Image (cartoon, rainbow, N blue to C red):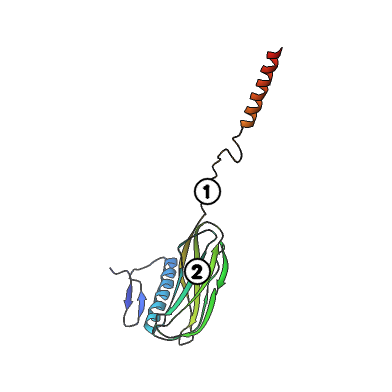
């Protein structure tokens, strides 16, 4: 049995399973509506690809990485009124560039890229989240897409341990040993005199 069925005459997706439960029927209706939306989007030829990458997947704490957002018209029709927004992760400081951008239109196969640089504050593994884009198809209907989620690992700086040499601070307790030895020598010499 096939898990999903596409009626090629109506371009509508239907469930191959009989469903008795009302809440399950509602879920299937929602899923069917979403599936039909994507089938029609592919049929009508519009689509926007949104990707988010970083220049480095791992950096040292306090160092910078560049985030690149790329949009591409993957459909067969021109898209318009495109707005792309990305948010700054909480554990990073904004250094330079653009975190959002607007484009009047993108023809099929065209792409645009913008970048911004961030600097890490804390060590750890961080999900930089998804960028979001809205755009209008040729009929004026608006759509929203989200990018992938970029990850960055921030490594803590290595700490060089201090090894005491005995010269800078001296060996602890040595002063007391010398003081006691000195007192014993003085006491011995005084006894010997008597």
Q: Which mark is residue 100?
A: none
54 vs 105, nearest the viewer? 54
Q: How many marks?
A: 2
- Decide: few, some or many residues near mark 1? Use Cα within 10 Å; few <14, some 14-19, many ≥20: few
Q: Nearer the viewer, mark 1 or mark 2?
A: 1
110 vs 175, nearest the viewer? 175
**Residue shown at 46% from the left, 63% from the top:** 151
Choose the circle earlier in sequence order: 1 or 2: 2
Instruction: Check the image and report above or below for 123 versus 67.
Output: above
| Residue beneath disc 1 | 160
Percent position (x, y) of residue 149? 46, 67
Q: Secondary structure at mark 2?
A: strand
Quarter of the image holding residue 10?
Answer: bottom left
159 vs 106, nearest the viewer? 159
Instruction: Check the image and report above or below for 61 versus 79.
Output: above
Indicate the quadrant containing the C terminus: top left, top right, bottom left or bottom right: top right
11 vs 88, nearest the viewer? 88
Percent position (x, y) of residue 84? 51, 77
| Residue beneath disc 2 | 66
């Amino acid at each position: 049995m096939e898990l999903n069925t596409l009626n090629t005459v109506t371009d509508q997706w239907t469930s191959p399973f009989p469903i008795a439960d009302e809440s399950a029927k509602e879920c299937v209706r929602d899923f069917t509506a979403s599936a039909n939306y994507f089938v029609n989007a592919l049929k009508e030829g519009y689509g926007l690809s949104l990707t988010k990458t970083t220049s480095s997947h791992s950096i040292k704490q306090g160092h910078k990485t560049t985030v690149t957002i790329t949009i591409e018209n993957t459909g067969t029709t021109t898209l318009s009124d495109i707005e792309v927004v990305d948010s700054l992760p909480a554990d990073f400081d904004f250094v330079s560039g653009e975190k959002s951008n607007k484009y009047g239109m993108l023809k099929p196969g065209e792409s645009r890229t913008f970048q911004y640089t961030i600097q890490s504050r804390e060590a750890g593994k961080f999900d930089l989240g998804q960028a979001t884009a809205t755009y209008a198809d040729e009929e004026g209907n608006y759509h929203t897409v989200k990018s992938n989620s970029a990850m960055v690992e921030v490594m803590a700086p290595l700490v060089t341990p201090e090894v005491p040499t005995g010269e800078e601070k001296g060996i602890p307790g040595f002063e007391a040993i010398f003081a006691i030895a000195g007192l014993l020598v003085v006491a011995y010499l005084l006894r010997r005199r008597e």
